[in-house]
Image (cartoon, grey):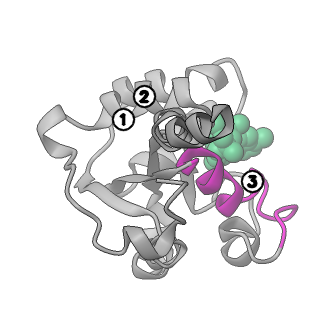
Amino acid sequence: MHIFLSLEIKKPLFNSLIAMEKTLVIIKPGTIQRGYIGEIIQRFEKKGLQLCGMKMIQLDEKILLEHYAHLAHRPFFGRIKDAMMITPVIVCCWKGIDAIRIVRAMAGVTNGRDAAPGTIRGDYSVSVQENIVHASDSPETAAIELKRFFNDNEIFDYKQHQLDFLYANDEI
Ligand code: IDP
Ligand code: MG
């Protein structure tokens, strides 16, 4: 009886513990110039993440000072800022269970020369700076960064019809 009861309550409890996450990806100017926008977006789509927001925007000094505040003291900071403003960028919001961790792993380590083959940076980059995408690195950062680049009405929560085939029914 006791076991039966705990099985009964397991599913709703389990569900409430597993949260869908949203994370920010920025497709950097070099990626746009090199014509890889579609390939990069397709990687996240093929993985099974859901695109909840996407737009092209021109970054400026102010937003980059905020976004890369942790690098402001570094000698190469001016160069990074310039590179991020050279053309517009595409900001995307991707959603899924563990999306933040998944997208970071798919991006690979910062230096494209060190990034593992199979990762985005490993496959498309030979540079530390010109490394194809930005990806949020933690739940806290993802929340702040999504707010930085999107208004609330630019993030869409809509039904992902593949959901039942992407996850087992005890995962969603
Ligand atoms: P991340 O993008 O892997 O999170 P961060 O350390 O947050 O790496 O750096 C932000 C961005 O700044 C990098 O993606 C890269 O474009 C650039 N960057 C970081 N370190 C260097 C460096 O040593 N030289 C040149 N550019 C750098
Ligand atoms: Mg970072």
Q: Look at mark 2 in the image and give the residue it sits on.
A: 143
Q: Magenta includes 66?
A: no
C-alpha distance separating marks 2 and 3 = 25 Å
Sequence order check, earlier mark of 3 and 1: 3
- Which quarter of the rendering shows the N terminus? top right
C-alpha distance separating marks 3 and 1 = 24 Å
- Between residue 170 and residue 151, name the one nearer to us: 170
The correct choice, above or below, for 114 with respect to 11 in the image is below
Q: What residue span does the magenta drawing correspond to?
A: 98-116
Q: Look at mark 3 in the image and give the residue it sits on.
A: 128
- Residue 156 point in image, percent of width and height: 19, 49
Is ligand 1 within 8 Å of the beta carbon of the residue shown at mark 3? Answer: yes
Q: What residue is drawn where x is 48% and y is 41%? A: 15
Q: Is residue 102 left or right of residue 86?
A: right
- Residue 84 point in image, percent of width and height: 46, 47
Q: Look at mark 1 in the image and give the residue it sits on.
A: 146
* Figure quadrant of residue 147: top left
Q: What residue is drawn where x is 65% and y is 47%? A: 101
Q: Amino acid at mark 3?
A: Val
* Label 2 with label 1: CB-CB less than 8 Å: yes
* Figure quadrant of residue 38: bottom left
- Residue 110 point in image, percent of width and height: 74, 50
Sequence order check, earlier mark of 2 and 3: 3
